[in-house]
Amino acid sequence: MNRFPIEIRRATISDIPTLVEYNKAMALETEGKNLDKKILAAGVKNLFKNPEFGFYLVAEMDIKIVGQLMITYEWSDWRNGMFWWIQSVYVNPESRGQGIYKRLYQSVLELAREKENVCGIRLYVDKTNLSAKKVYGACGMAEAHYDMYEVDFVLK
């Protein structure tokens, strides 16, 4: 069990270097993509400049960030509400298996339920990332019946 409690908080500008590091590590680990650090840093900074795009939550243990996730928004006309999308999930390897994602997810649920216009939580996961799928299922999320299609102008 943890020697230190897990604290969840909104990320701040001072967390940007860790957010960039963790996003870079996550992309390499989960998709084999080596992201351009300069573009990535600009993207993370832009979220703080444009809070209407979303926000980051971080998990800390002993004043060290050990996990993160980002929330972005999608309007649903069918539900007359906003879906919160969980993205950029990362828990550093030394801290995995300690319930860090679960605590981050619980915080997302609590924050979302406080908002009248949030109609649900969504995320996407690489089809081959079986460990992540197991964690998301254990948290109460169900696999949706949608497949995702995209045109990526940056990473192609």
Image (tube, rainbow, N blue to C red):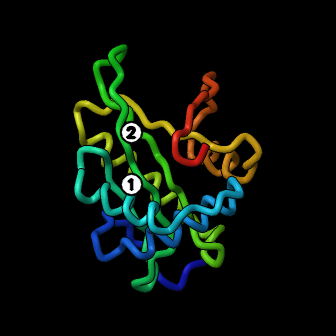
The N terminus sits in image quarter:
bottom right
Q: Residue at x 63, y 63 (%)?
A: 34
Q: Position of residue 9 (x, y in %)?
A: 33, 66
Q: CA distance from mark 1 to mark 2?
A: 13 Å
**Quarter holding the C terminus?**
top right
Q: Amino acid at mark 1?
A: Ser
Q: Which residue is mark 2?
A: 84
Q: Looking at the image, which residue is at 44% across and 85% down? A: 62
Name the residue located 63 percent from the left edge and 22 percent from the top edge: 145
Q: Is 113 rendered above or below residue 94?
A: above
Residue 5 visible in this rendered orientation of the protein: no
Instruction: Say left or right for 67 vs 132.
Output: left
- Per the image, label 1 sits on a secondary structure element best described as helix
Q: Which mark is residue 107?
A: 1
Residue 142 placement, left or right of 116? right
Residue flagged by tag 2: what amino acid is it?
Trp
Position above or below: 3 against 92: below
- Looking at the image, is mark 1 or mark 2 earlier in the sequence? 2
Q: Indicate which label's residue lies in the foreground, 1 or 2.
A: 2
Decide which of 92, 106 is in the foreground and name it. Answer: 92
